[in-house]
Structures are given as C-alpha cells and as structure tokens.
C-alpha cells in the first residue's frame, strides 16, 4: 500500500485543528500508518508506534514533519492501557491479532481522553487464515460495538486489498460514555 492510500483511509478520522495531540499506533508494523497519522496531526503532536518486532525503524524522513514519532518495542496486546489519556489510538491491521476483541476494545476506548478517537483499519472479512487469525469485517465490528455499547463506528473509507476479495476498510470509533 502506498502512503497516500494510507493517509486517505484515516485522514477524515483525525482532528488536525487545535493544539498538539498524543496518539498511539498499536501494532505499528512497518510504520506505514504511523507516518500517515503523523502527516495529518497538528504541529507538535507525538505518535508512539508500538510493535513487538523491530521492523520499523525511524528514518531521517520521519523527522521532516512537525509531529514527533517515538517507537516502543512491546506486544501491544499486553501493555497497560489504563490512565494513558491519549487523544487517539490507531489500530491498522492489528485488531485481527487480538482473540478477545470485545475486552480489548473496551480497554482501548477507556484509555482515551474525553473526546478521544479510535481509528481501526482492517480487512473486510470474517474468514481467518495464518496471517489474519481473528478477522473482523465492518459488519461484525459494528455488531460488536452495538452488542457491548462500547462505541459508535463511522466508516471512513475503503480500498481494494491485494490479499483478499473483501478489501480494506477504515472506521472512526467514538467511545460511548
């Protein structure tokens, strides 16, 4: 996926007006969506990219913008999210690694500041495989949020996937508080 496509998938879910913000990218992988997020945030913002592999390393080009990118080597499913009070959390192609998605989404949404945002990017399928063990289609995610009263999802965008027929979707989730 190109950086411009990643930006288009998430940009309408990010508030780029006002003061600097702090965001987490859970399961940052290669950092593609980390860079996309950083390019959309207000000046002075910070994105902490968390992943258990070290496949993402900061490059000089990551520092040309006005948003600072920090990296943290950790399994995002095991970090303590309590009392983080971040403005937003991005989960791009990472929720499908979480077995207890209901419980994890509740923890994630509870860690946001009032008015905070959760952006999810996922494959639009419910059929798992070795690389996507716990997929969650847009329909399934919406039903999960309704069932748990955890939040309200608004679809941001879609793009074709080279790996599966259903494509990739992005959503903005507002916590139901």
Image (spheres, helix red, strand yellow):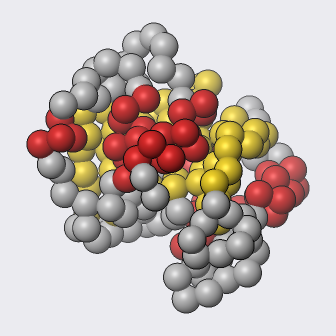
At x 37%, y 32%, the residue is 39
Q: Quick one: which residue is furthest to the top in this view?
A: 18
Q: Is residue 90 left or right of residue 103?
A: left
**Residue 85 showing in the rendered view:** no
Q: Quick one: which residue is furthest to the bottom in this view?
A: 130
Q: Is residue 58 above or below residue 115?
A: below
**Residue 142 showing in the rendered view:** yes
Tell me residue 116's x, y (percent).
57, 30
Q: Is residue 140 left or right of residue 132?
A: right
Q: Is residue 168 above or below residue 3?
A: below
Q: Is residue 5 above or below residue 94?
A: above
Quarter residue 119 falls in: top right
| Nearest the eye: 93 or 174 | 93
Tell me residue 128's x, y (percent).
67, 83
Q: How many marks?
A: 0
Instruction: State the quadrant of the C terminus.
Output: top right
Quarter residue 84 falls in: top left
Tell me residue 16's x, y (percent).
48, 20
| Nearest the eye: 70 or 6 | 6
At x 52%, y 53%, the residue is 91
At x 24%, y 28%, the residue is 65
Q: Is residue 173 left or right of residue 77?
A: right
Quarter residue 133 falls in: bottom right
At x 38%, y 57%, the residue is 28
Tell me residue 10's x, y (percent).
55, 40
């Amino acid at each position: 996926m190109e950086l411009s496509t990643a930006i288009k998938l998430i940009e309408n879910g990010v508030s780029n007006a006002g003061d600097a913000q702090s965001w987490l990218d859970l399961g940052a992988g290669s950092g593609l969506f980390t860079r996309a997020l950083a390019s959309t945030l207000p000046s002075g913002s910070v994105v902490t990219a968390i992943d258990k592999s070290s496949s993402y390393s900061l490059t000089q080009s990551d520092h040309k913008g006005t948003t600072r990118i920090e990296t943290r080597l950790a399994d995002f499913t095991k970090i303590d999210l309590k009392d983080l009070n971040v403005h937003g959390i991005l989960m791009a192609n990472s929720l499908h690694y979480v077995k207890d998605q209901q419980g994890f989404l509740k923890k994630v949404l509870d860690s946001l500041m009032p008015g905070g945002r959760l952006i999810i990017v996922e494959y639009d399928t419910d059929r798992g495989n070795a690389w996507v063990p716990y997929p969650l289609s847009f329909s399934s995610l919406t039903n999960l949020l309704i069932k748990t009263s955890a939040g309200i999802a608004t679809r941001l965008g879609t793009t074709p996937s080279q790996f599966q027929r259903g494509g990739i979707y992005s959503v903005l989730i507002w916590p139901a508080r």
